Amino acid sequence: MRMSPLLFLAVSAALATAGLSPLSTLAQDLPAAHAHILHVQEAFSGTPDGEGLLAVAIADAETAAQHAQLSAGGDPTDIDPMIRHARHVLHAVDPTQFPNGPGSGFGLKAAADAIVRHIEMAAATPDASDNVRTHAAHVAAAARAIAARAERITAKVGEIVGAGVYNRAYPLTGELAELTEALAGGEDLSGDGTISLDEGGLNQVEQHLNLMAEGEGL
């Protein structure tokens, strides 16, 4: 008999609290598609505290947006805090590029890439339903847009750090703030007045993940 999703999560949380790796041994007790969905939605052994990949992505995106606002919102003639907070943004987005800062240590980019990987693995399993396959495509499209936006944020931080003088750095901090704000809701890159899934953000990922989970009874 397969373990129910709720029991799976309860046992996973208990093992994570004990410092053990819960998912590798327990995921086999769920349908394979559901195990991958729960990696995104509820618990993943590679994240801080075993949180789900989406929760980590949201937390790091919020940290990045907060520090982008701090970078842009200070004294426009003082480059030092612009650079300091821009580097904090970078840490939240990709700690491999800047290892010390206020982010989770996992990184938004890594979380978005892992969401794509696991949700597509869910859709590719033999037991995947039409519901999973449909919404997995939507989740993956928005998560890819987030990962691409993370790369643009990384590049923008590099421009700020390399600007050299405040009057060149300051306008760039405003652009950085706009990019980090779009991590949640996406951005209309095509200029057609709508935000498609391939322009989306974490709100779109969460929406379609929830629809998928509801359809699976998770």
Image (cartoon, rainbow, N blue to C red):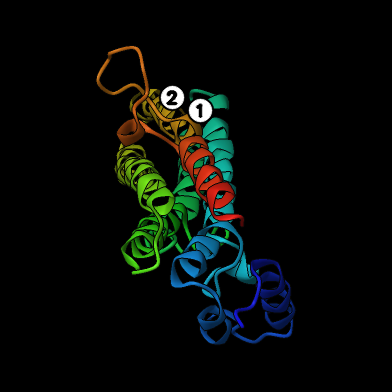
Left of 156 or right of it: where is 31? right
Residue 64: x %, y % from top left = 52, 43
Secondary structure under the numbered disc 2 in the rendered image? helix
Instruction: Give the residue number, with chain letter if any, for mark 1.
Output: 72
Q: Residue at x 41, y 32 (%)?
A: 179
Residue 171: x %, y % from top left = 38, 22
Q: Quadrant of the N terminus?
A: bottom right
Left of 47 or right of it: where is 144? left
Left of 140 or right of it: where is 58? right
Outermost residue on the left side: it is 190
Q: Which amino acid type is shown beneath numbered disc 1?
A: Ala
Residue 17: x %, y % from top left = 73, 78
Left of 79 or right of it: where is 16? right
Q: Residue at x 36, y 52 (%)?
A: 133
Note whether 12 is above or below 79 in the view shown. below
Secondary structure under the numbered disc 1 in the rendered image? helix
Instruction: Give the residue number, with chain letter if any, for mark 2.
Output: 174
* Nearer to us in this view, 38 or 187: 38
Residue 68: x %, y % from top left = 51, 35
* Nearer to us in this view, 138 or 175: 138
Q: Residue at x 35, y 68 (%)?
A: 125
User: Could you classify mark 1 by the number of other residues whose Cα lies within 10 Å: few (under 14), some (14-19), or many (20 or more)?
Assistant: many
